[in-house]
C-alpha cells in the first residue's frame, strides 16, 4: 500500500470511529469512563481548559456556595475553592466514586479540603438542601446526563432565588452538544439567559434562576 493510500485509510478509519462514537453517545449519554480519567488532565486539554479562565465567565466570589456537578478528578474544584475563600463552600458531586476519590486527593494536596464537601451522587437527586447553592457549574458534564429536564428541575430546587447555572461544553468530548441545543433545553426549563462566551470548539453559557 502506498503512503497516500495508508494515510487516507487511517484518516477514514479515524473519522468513521469518531462519527460512530458520537452517534452512540447522542443516543445514550453516559458518564466519562473512569479508565479514561487521564484525558481530563491531559496537557492538550489544559491548553484550552485553564481552570481560572474557564471559571471566569461564571463570576465566582468570596463566600459563595458552589456546586461542581460532575467534578470528575477535581480539575476545577480547587480553583473554585480558592475563589470562594474560607467563608465559601464547594459541593463537589460525581456519580463515580473512583473519580471523586481522585478529586478528594487533589483537594487535600492543595490544602483546600476544609472548603469542599464531596458527595457521590447522581444529578437527579442531589444530597443538598433546597435553595442552598449560589451557582451550579457543569463543565463537560451536561451532555453526559441523559434527562436534561430532570437535571434542571433538581438544579432549580437546590439553587437560591436569583442563583446561576454555568455550563461549559467542549468539542473533543464525544457527547458534545452545540450551544443552540443546550440553550433550547435551558429555555424550555424556564431559566433566564445570561450570556455566552467562547467559540464553537469550547463555549460557556450562563443562566439565572428567577
Ligand atoms: C467529562 S467528565 C468532566 C469532569 C470535570 N468537570 C472536568 O471537566 O474535568 C464528566 C463527569 O460527569 C460525571 N457524571 C456523568 N453523569 C453524571 C450524573 N448523572 N450525575 C453526576 N455526575 C455525572 C462523570 O462521572 C464525570 O466525572
Image: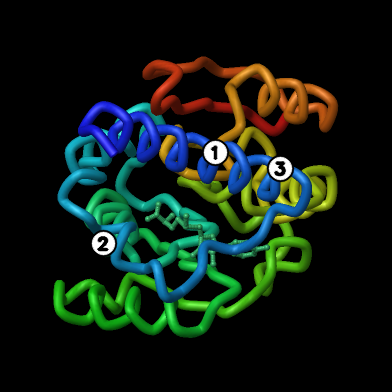
Q: For the view shown, which residue lies furthest in the front direction?
A: 1
Looking at the rendered image, the quarter that the C terminus falls into is: top right
* Disc marking residue 109: none
Which quadrant of the structure image shows residue 181? top right
- Residue 18, compared with residue 191, is above or below; it is below
**Left or right relative to 118: residue 54:** left
Q: Earlier in the sequence, mark 3 or mark 1?
A: 1
Image location (x, y in percent) of residue 90:
42, 63
Q: Does the image show residue 12?
A: yes
Image location (x, y in percent) of residue 158:
69, 55
Label 3: few (<14), some (14–19) or many (≥20) C-alpha neighbours in 10 Å: some
Here the colouring is rainbow
Label 2: few (<14), some (14–19) or many (≥20) C-alpha neighbours in 10 Å: many
Question: How far apart, in angstroms, are the residues tagged by discs 2 and 1?
Answer: 37 Å
**Left or right relative to 191: residue 81:** left
Identify residue for label 2.
Answer: 78
Image location (x, y in percent) of residue 38:
29, 66
Foreground tag (3 vs 1): 1
Label 1: few (<14), some (14–19) or many (≥20) C-alpha neighbours in 10 Å: few
Looking at the rendered image, the quarter that the N terminus falls into is: top left
Q: Are marks 3 and 1 in contact (CB under 8 Å)?
A: no
- Total marks shown come to 3
Of helix, strand and loop, which one carries label 3? Answer: helix
Q: Earlier in the sequence, mark 3 or mark 2?
A: 3
Of helix, strand and loop, which one carries label 2? Answer: helix
Question: How far apart, in angstroms, are the residues tagged by discs 3 and 1?
Answer: 15 Å
Identified at 54% across, 58% down, the residue is 69
Identify residue for label 3.
Answer: 26
Of helix, strand and loop, which one carries label 1? Answer: helix
Label 1 CB-ligand 1 distance < 8 A: no
Amino acid at each position: 500500500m502506498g503512503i497516500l493510500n495508508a494515510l487516507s485509510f487511517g484518516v477514514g478509519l479515524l473519522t468513521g470511529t469518531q462519527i460512530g462514537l458520537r452517534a452512540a453517545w447522542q443516543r445514550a449519554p453516559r458518564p466519562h469512563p473512569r479508565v479514561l480519567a487521564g484525558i481530563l488532565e491531559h496537557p492538550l486539554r489544559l491548553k484550552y481548559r485553564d481552570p481560572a479562565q474557564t471559571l471566569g465567565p461564571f463570576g465566582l466570589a468570596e463566600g459563595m456556595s458552589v456546586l461542581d456537578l460532575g467534578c470528575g478528578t477535581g480539575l476545577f474544584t480547587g480553583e473554585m475553592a480558592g475563589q470562594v475563600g474560607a467563608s465559601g463552600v464547594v459541593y463537589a458531586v460525581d456519580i463515580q466514586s473512583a473519580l471523586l476519590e481522585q478529586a478528594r486527593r487533589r483537594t487535600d494536596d492543595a490544602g483546600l479540603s476544609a472548603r469542599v464537601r464531596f458527595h457521590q451522587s447522581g444529578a437527579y437527586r442531589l444530597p443538598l438542601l433546597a435553595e442552598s447553592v449560589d451557582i451550579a457549574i457543569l463543565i463537560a458534564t451536561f451532555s453526559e446526563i441523559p434527562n436534561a429536564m430532570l437535571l434542571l428541575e433538581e438544579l432549580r430546587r437546590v439553587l437560591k432565588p436569583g442563583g446561576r447555572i454555568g455550563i461549559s461544553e467542549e468539542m473533543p468530548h464525544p457527547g458534545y452538544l452545540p450551544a443552540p441545543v443546550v440553550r433550547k433545553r435551558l429555555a424550555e426549563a424556564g431559566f433566564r439567559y445570561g450570556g455566552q462566551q467562547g467559540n464553537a470548539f469550547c463555549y460557556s453559557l450562563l443562566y439565572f434562576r428567577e
